[in-house]
Image: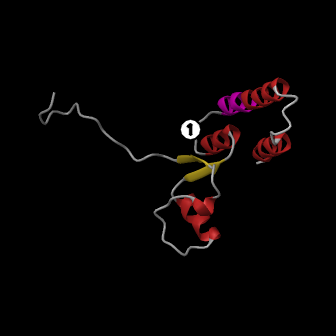
Amino acid sequence: GGGGGGGGLRLRAPVATFVHEVLPREQQLTSLAEGLSSEEREEAWGKLNIYFHRTYVGAAINAHRCGLLSLAGLARVGRAAVEDLIRLRIGRLRDVRREWPGHIAELNADVER
């Protein structure tokens, strides 16, 4: 019910925010002050626990570093991402329009972090 009882919804601030980086970071909507250098923006986002990623592996690595995902969970995400990429590649062997080397490089860059 309504009233002033103690059973209401309690909201907490998020521990971290994960943003799928589709646009370059310079084009991201932000409440940060205008005119910041890219280094200052990165530092401010880091202090706010805002993490950008281009792959699920990148998001999982950041979640693990924040204590939100176990090492076993991180390993499962990594395996699933590799399996998905292989399955997509095999399914589209003749698709020359896809930027496969770029997709593989993004995944490898996240794994190397």
Q: Position of residue 28 (x, y in %)?
A: 56, 58
Residue 99 versus residue 59: which sits nearer the camera?
A: 99
Q: Position of residue 72 (x, y in %)?
A: 68, 29
Picture layout, residue 22 above or below residue 34: above
Query: Mark 1: few, some, or many residues within 10 Å (few <14, many ≥20)?
Result: some
Q: Residue at x 84, y 33 (%)?
A: 95
Q: Residue at x 70, y 27 (%)?
A: 76
Q: Position of residue 92 (x, y in %)?
A: 82, 28
Q: Which residue is identified by label 1?
A: 68
Label 1 SS: loop
Residue 5 versus residue 111: which sits nearer the camera?
A: 111
Left or right of 60? Residue 29 is left
The quarter of the picture where the N terminus appears is: top left
Three-letter residue code for mark 1: Leu
Residue 63 versus residue 106: which sits nearer the camera?
A: 106
Q: Is residue 74 magenta?
A: yes
Q: Count of labels shown?
A: 1
Please give the range of residues in magenta.
71-79
Left or right of 58? Residue 51 is left
- Residue at the outermost bottom position: 35
Q: Residue at x 55, y 60 (%)?
A: 45
Image quadrant assignment for residue 102 = top right
Left or right of 68? Residue 2 is left
Image quadrant assignment for residue 57 = top right
Main SS class of the magenta portion in the image: helix
Q: How is the image coloured?
A: secondary structure
- Residue at the outermost left position: 3
Picture layout, residue 105 above or below residue 91: below
Q: Position of residue 79 (x, y in %)?
A: 76, 28
Q: Residue at x 74, y 33 (%)?
A: 78
Q: Is residue 53 magenta?
A: no
